[in-house]
Amino acid sequence: ESREGFPPGIDPAKPYLLVMLHPVTTEDDAANRAMVTSVLRVLERMRMPTVLVWGNSDAYSRMVGPAVAEWIETRRPPFLYATKLMQPDVYARMLARAACALGNSSSFIREGAYLGTPAVIVGNRQQGRERAENVTEVPADAEKIEQAVRAQLAHGKYARSALFGDGRSGERI
């Protein structure tokens, strides 16, 4: 199995979580902090190899980024590889091979559907968006998040979904 672009500590042949946390621009700092804290609590409990991508520039990122940075600095989780940036081709490979995607990224819904990647969407950032069967949506509650992640890990990969296209539009155009 190719390790191209995979960070240290993450073996593409073994289960790992891919986590992406974006601020929810329709919620205040307290709600965003609760979402981040709940996800990080689950990561601590599960202690599974994890790639965490964080740090976009949406409103409220001033809270999400520092909350993640503080957790990393104080806990120094040995199972975690954290980054603010990832090349798109590396991200696609990581999403394709992840045992479960966790957080609130639209890529878990769109690209994750095409790749069949099990995903747990936390909170309401993606509320109302169409989704394939690979997605489970839960509130920002650590117990519910952990239950959903464990269920997705037990399920494993989903069949690819063409809900958002079959990957051949360029060819057709």
Image (cartoon, rainbow, N blue to C red):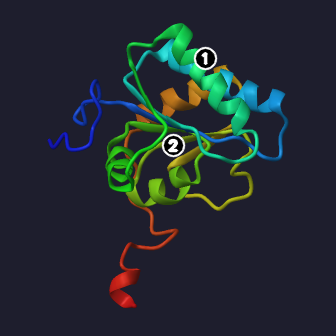
Query: Quick one: 130 or 31, which is closer to the camera?
Result: 31
Front-lying residue, 153 or 93:
93
Vertical relation: 120 (above or below) 115: above
Mark number displayed over residue 31: none
**Pointers 2 and 1 in contact (C-beta within 8 Å):** no
Secondary element at tag 1: helix
Q: Is residue 34 left or right of residue 27?
A: left
Which residue lies under the disc numbered 1?
70
- Disc 1 marks a residue whose amino acid type is Glu
Q: Amino acid at mark 2?
A: Ala
Nearest to N terminus: mark 2 or mark 1: 1
Q: Position of residue 167 (x, y in %)?
A: 38, 73
Image height check: is 70 above or below 19?
above
Q: Residues within 10 Å of mark 1 (few under 14, many from 20)?
A: few
Q: Residue 35's x, y, as percent? A: 71, 29
Res 33 → quadrant: top right
Residue drawn at the location 73% of the way across and 52% of the way down: 127
Q: Does residue 144 appear in the picture of this structure? A: no
